[in-house]
Image (cartoon, grey):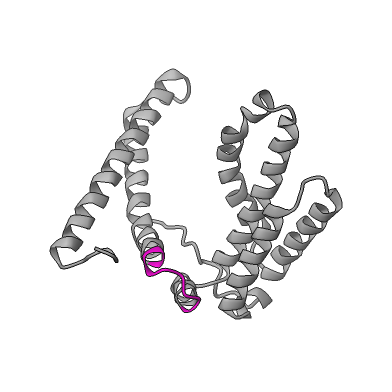
Amino acid sequence: MRHSFSDKFANLDSLLSRLSIKFKVLFCLGFVFLVVLTSIKFELVFLFYGLFVVLLIFVSKIPISFILRRWLTVLPFLALVLVSVPFIQEDGWVIFTSCLIKASLVILTLTLLIQTTHFSNLLKALESLKVPGLIIMLFSFMYRYLFVVEDEVLRKKRALESRCSAKAGWSLIKSTANMAGSLFIHTYERAERVYLAMCARGYKVDGE
């Protein structure tokens, strides 16, 4: 199976890859908070934010096509969440635009952080910054089992393509929805089995 590792560009010889991981994490969090808290009325400020992120992309040496694919993957979900805002708020389109721009800047920034840092080193940096151990453990399990879920998605997609002759239309939509539902159930069941196995080996959540 082929996998798209989240830190596949961490070995590039770039300025961002050579920076201290703690500095990158703190700077990324500070920049994210700055973007979120800035009013959309300051258009020039957001233009500066955008140019700054573009500069970081060039400095990172990560292919722009890869960054754009990651951004475009998340963009439809953002638009789907925000699509009703213009119709239920007086300044709905302003809120819609504001959230879309801010979310895009945050996604691009986090993508740069993750892609220029080995994931294990990122977890160590978060631990040294006194991030709660439960959160670090959740990130670790998420990264570890992401490849398992990806394998299952590829298998189900291959099975769907071999059994579904329709290339488009309602039949394909229905089959895809059934596949997504099955994947969700199997993922939930796997998480439950992993948790029970951990408990059987003495694992306890902090505070229990």
| Image side of residue 102 versus residue 132, left or right | right
Residue 164 image point, x, y percent? 35, 27
Residue 70 image point, x, y percent? 58, 51
Residue 198 image point, x, y percent? 20, 62
Compared to 167, does 179 lie above or below?
Answer: below
Q: Nearer the viewer, residue 47 or 170?
A: 47
Placement of the C terminus among the 4 image quadrants: bottom left
Residue drawn 30% across and 36% down? 182
Compared to 5, does 159 lie above or below?
Answer: above
Residue sticking out furthest to the right: 44
| Image side of residue 85 versus residue 97, left or right | left
Q: Nearer the viewer, residue 170 or 131?
A: 131
Q: Nearer the viewer, residue 39 or 46?
A: 39
Question: Residue 147, located in which quarter of the rendered image?
Answer: bottom left
Residue 141 image point, x, y percent? 34, 61
- The residue segment tinted magenta is 128-136
Residue drawn 51% across and 66% down? 8
Residue drawn 33% across and 57% down? 145
Residue sticking out furthest to the front: 207
Magenta highlight on residue 115: no
Residue sticking out furthest to the left: 200
Placement of the N terminus among the 4 image quadrants: bottom left
